[in-house]
């Protein structure tokens, strides 16, 4: 018998998606009859708009979409994504600079696989989305965390980034609006960070998936547009999932210089070939249409955002800064760690989240999943009644801590 491990070290090192794991556990408990309310999943609770669904139905009837199409995406969709990008952020690109991917996650993986050699460092602001570290790791890169907290609204400064930079730094990952915190950089902050990256010859990978979900006085600023000095060292990640309530359709994209897009397309040609043609035609309808559907969702999210933040800040020991974008709140629960609650003394936010799931039947994602223990991420992309009930249950339980 061979003593060699059955699973490769590279794949063994990958962690399960914590957000999907929490969501799956909540759904399993619900299926077993428990009235669980889940704040874990990052997806709108709205159906995909009808005109997008109709475009998919029509595409399914067309024999040409029953066959292979170009690995990098349908030409008409790539052209529409280029037009949409110019419309929404003022960034002018050609269709040849677009690669259509199987959801945003594939775009994340492919950009790091394309840019990184073993040992190259990527600056990642923490808290960060759970998939980034795994994609960097699989590419052989080294993630360098730039840790922020609630005192700065989870925003990193140029000084923090410069302190983390070394001669091995190749990429800055810039995310605004942010998952998990909802933080949004102002135009001034975005320009300062972009100019710093350009000055040091860094690549900037910018995830703009939440570009249309900003609230109050906050504005989305594309670093690619705001800092032309970055030139051909910027790659944009995006997709239809959040803007058009299309998480299950699996269509994302990356936009970048031609050599990067060509290399990433070569990778995709061997990994998956083309994205589902039916989904691509649905995405074409989405990006070619107006933004009225997202405007309605944004109004609902804004209402829920304000309600959730108010209710969370009424819970003793919880502090929640106001998120400016996306659809997440990221409260600190550090004051509750180690306190007695229902005969237990949770020693981490992960243990506290487990206790809340068991005792209050409310599912939240602990900060450990995002690189900053002592916090929870709660999505407010769920119905108003469930949101109020879920936070109330959690508050009632946590108020017993002593």
Image (spheres, helix red, strand yellow):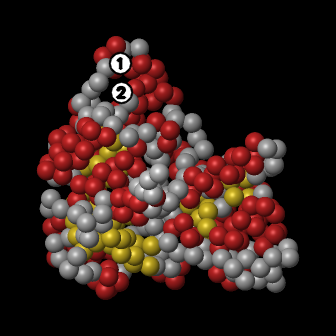
The image quarter containing residue 284 is top left
297, above or below 117, in the image: above
SS at badge 2: helix
Verify CB contact (< 8 Å) between mark 1 and mark 2: yes
First in residue order: circle 1 vs circle 2: 1
Q: Is residue 189 left or right of residue 399?
A: left
Residue 277 rendering spot, x and y as whole percentages:
36, 27
Q: Which residue is mark 1?
A: 66
248 is higher (above) or lower (below) than 348: above
Residue 347 is situated, as x and y percent measured from the top left of the image, at 69, 79
Q: Is residue 322 visible?
A: no
Where residue 259 appears, x then y in whole percent? 13, 50
Left or right side of 275 for 178: right
Q: Crowdedness of circle 1 by 10 Å Cα count: few (<14), some, many (20+)? A: few
Going 27% across and 80% down the picture, which residue do you hit?
A: 165
Mark 2 lies on residue: 277
Q: Element type at marker 1?
A: helix
Q: Is residue 119 above or below residue 44?
A: below
Instruction: Name the spot of residue 111 as percent of width and height, x first.
Output: 28, 54
Q: CA distance from mark 1 to mark 2?
A: 8 Å
């Amino acid at each position: 018998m061979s003593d060699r491990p059955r699973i490769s070290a590279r794949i063994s090192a990958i962690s399960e998606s914590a957000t999907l794991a929490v969501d799956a556990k909540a759904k399993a408990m619900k299926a077993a009859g428990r009235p669980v309310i889940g704040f874990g999943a990052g997806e709108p609770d709205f159906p995909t708009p009808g005109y997008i669904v109709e475009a998919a139905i029509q595409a399914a009837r067309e024999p040409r979409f029953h066959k292979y199409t170009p690995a990098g995406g349908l030409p008409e969709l790539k052209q529409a994504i280029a037009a949409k990008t110019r419309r929404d952020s003022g960034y002018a690109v050609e269709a040849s600079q677009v690669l259509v991917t199987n959801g945003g996650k594939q775009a994340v993986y492919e950009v790091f696989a394309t840019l990184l050699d073993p040992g190259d460092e990527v600056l990642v602001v923490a808290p960060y989305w759970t998939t980034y570290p795994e994609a960097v790791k699989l590419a052989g890169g080294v993630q360098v965390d730039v840790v922020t907290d609630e005192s700065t609204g989870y925003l990193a400064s140029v000084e923090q980034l410069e302190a983390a930079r070394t001669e091995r730094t190749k990429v800055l990952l810039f995310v605004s609006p942010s998952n998990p915190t909802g933080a949004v950089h102002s135009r001034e902050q975005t320009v300062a960070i972009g100019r710093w990256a350009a000055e040091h010859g860094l690549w900037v990978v910018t995830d703009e998936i939440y570009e249309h979900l900003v609230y109050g006085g906050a504005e989305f600023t594309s670093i690619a547009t705001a800092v032309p000095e970055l030139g051909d060292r910027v790659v944009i990640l995006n997709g239809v999932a959040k803007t058009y309530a299309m998480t299950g359709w699996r269509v994302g994209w990356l936009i970048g210089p031609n050599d990067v897009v060509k290399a990433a397309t070569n990778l995709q040609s061997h990994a998956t070939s083309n994205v589902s043609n039916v989904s691509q035609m649905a995405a074409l309808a989405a990006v070619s249409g107006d933004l009225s559907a997202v405007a309605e969702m944004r109004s609902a999210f804004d209402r829920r955002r304000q309600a959730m933040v108010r209710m969370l800040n009424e819970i003793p020991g919880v502090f929640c800064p106001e998120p400016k974008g996306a659809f997440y709140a990221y409260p600190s629960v550090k004051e509750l760690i180690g306190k007695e609650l229902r005969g237990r003394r949770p020693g981490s936010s992960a243990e506290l989240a487990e206790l809340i799931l068991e005792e209050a039947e409310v599912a939240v994602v602990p900060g450990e999943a995002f690189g900053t223990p002592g916090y929870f991420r709660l999505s407010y992309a769920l119905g108003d009644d469930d949101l109020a009930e879920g936070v109330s249950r959690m508050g009632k339980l946590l108020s017993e801590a002593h």
